[in-house]
Amino acid sequence: MNNNNVIEAQDLTKMFGDFTAVNAISFEVKKGEIFGFLGANGAGKTTAMKMLIGISKPTAGKAKVAGFDVYKQAEDIKKNIGYMSQKFALYDDLTVKENITFFGGIYGLSRKRIKEKSKLLIKELGLEEVENQLVGSLPLGWKQKLSFSVSLLHDPKIVFLDEPTGGVDPITRRQFWEMIYKAASEGTTVFVTTHYMDEAEYCDRVSIMVNGKIEALDTPKNLKQQFNVANMNDVFLKLARG
Amino acid sequence: MKRFIGFIKKEFYHIFRDRRSLFILFGMPIAQIMLFGFAITNEINNVDIAVLDHSKDATTKEIINKISASKYFSINQFIDRESDIETIFKKGKVKAVLNFEEGFSKKLIKDHKATIQIITDATDPNTANTISNYVNAILQQYQKGLNNDITIAYQIVPQTRMVYNPELKSVYMFVPGVMTIILMLVSAMMTSISITREKELGTMEILLVSPIKPIQVIVGKVFPYIFLSIVNAIVIVVLSIFIFKMPVQGSLFLLGLESVLFIITSLALGILISTISATQQTAMMISLMGLMLPVILLSGFIFPISSMPLPLQIISNIIPAKWFIIIIKGIMLKGVGLQYLWKETLILVGMTIFFIGLSVKKYKIRLE
């Protein structure tokens, strides 16, 4: 494995019965990169991601995440990654602080570390006044940002974000991407799926999945040049329509 | 271990912040035991009866006095015509009518035989049956008093003794049943709901991606309910001892152990339900239809298993509640120990292992 690569996939395949959800995809993600994983609904993005984060076993192919094999070392992978799912997944009936403490706890952070981290995090997000309020009472944008910060709590090498900006307003989306940039600048690799094509422009490199296969993989700039279009939206449309 | 404690703490937050589950956990056991103990009973007490006395002589008066003196009956009214019988039954308050034939006393002395008709409202067959038995018993006793001086050549004297529940209190029958229902409900339904809730919210996925092990998640989810179920069992036993004077003839310790065993059986069922249902609603429906109804109908709690049709008797064997009811009745009322209950205990243990095995298998399939 190249020392610079934190994710390596080779001919990674997932079949559900006769249906091939992910068809022999190969790609690498470099350390500190923001890697956009694009595709229409049902193209196989989420399935591919689930194989990488160790909750779905591949049918065939090889993959390494943070230097660990997805077949044999899923437990080691779990310690080194953060994950934020499509659904908002903090506990609504726990306060901001309790959520942070809980997730810090299941990642095995020490009590002292959790205290420091949660203080820092609450300050950064400007949540001081609501730290003892139930998360359920916060607006969605705040929840998403909190959720992202929680997924970074244990300083993972890679953070996987599954359509993190679904359903939030443009301003929050903007702030969200600022947070992603900040995390990347601090050395965290960001693996993000999205179907907002404008967001694809923010990524260092993007891959576009169509019907289980990766049809394109490059920097947004190169892709636009290659397809001779002005924006990523058109790149996507050209690919998806074949 | 630290992870695990944090997890359990979180579970308790969930429970104590949700009024609905708090109510189910603590309100329901108390409400149910009170309802079954006080309101729902198949004993008869102060049943209203009417009297149609065609003779109005000394003997009928004596019999009527005897009947109204018993705590089972109170004479609601006297009627004069046969046609009134139908009318008062239709009104519904009066459950039985005693009809003394004309010249009752005279016939009794002259012919040594007089008739009294007992008419009961059998829309509720059990009550009707009980009323007629009780009236019969009172008449028998009266008759015995009349025959005191005479010796009958052959006499069979039945001596009935109701053991283990001499006063035939129905609360003795309800407490084991209610305890079973509540433990089943709290353990199986609440855990299956709380696990499926994590699935529905998407937090289960987050947990599976984290380093915490699936088994820790499951044990962490059920642990608070083991604790709460034990508290519930204690509340029920204490209420039944102090309010309903229910005896615990056998060992309290054994009762506790068996209850913990049944709690674990129910939890295993709850986990199994959670592996096959995707939403909280499904989990709740399966728990209610698949567990509650069989527990109430087929466990022998209300309807005796021996009088069920054979297929149902066979089905009743696979219901864990049936075995647990036998066990607690044995301990509380008969005072027996493990030497009589080992078979039932073993069946529960077997079922528990089976359910846990099955859910582990199902859970793994889901992770693939």
Image (cartoon, coloured by chain):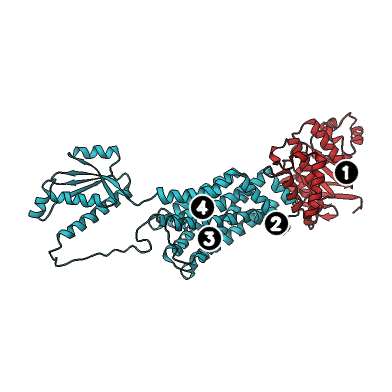
Task: Give the chain letter for cyan.
Answer: B
Amino acid beneath label 2: Phe
Q: Chain of mark 3?
A: B
Q: Where on the picture, by quarter, is residue A226? A: top right
Chain A: colour as depicted: red
User: Label 1, label 4: how many angstroms apart (C-alpha)?
Assistant: 53 Å
- Number of other residues with Cα within 10 Å of mark 1, as a class: few under 14, some 14 to 19, many 20 or more: some
Amino acid beneath label 3: Ser
Amino acid beneath label 1: Ala
Asked if both marks, 3 and 1, belong to the same chain, the answer given is no
The secondary structure type at the circle numbered 4 is helix
Residue holding disc 3: B259
- Determine if residue B219 is in view: yes
Residue holding disc 1: A184
The secondary structure type at the circle numbered 3 is helix
Asked whether disc 2 touches disc 4, contact meaning CB atoms under 8 Å apart, the reply is: no
| Mark nearer the viewer, 3 or 1 | 3
- Determine if residue A209 is in view: no
- Number of other residues with Cα within 10 Å of mark 3, as a class: few under 14, some 14 to 19, many 20 or more: many
Amino acid beneath label 4: Ile
Identify the mark nearer the N-term, 2 or 4: 2
Asked whether disc 3 touches disc 1, contact meaning CB atoms under 8 Å apart, the reply is: no
Q: Is residue B1 left or right of residue B40?
A: right
Residue holding disc 4: B182
Q: Residue furthest left?
A: B110
Residue B7: percent from the left, percent from the top? 69, 53
User: Label 3, label 1: how many angstroms apart (C-alpha)?
Assistant: 55 Å
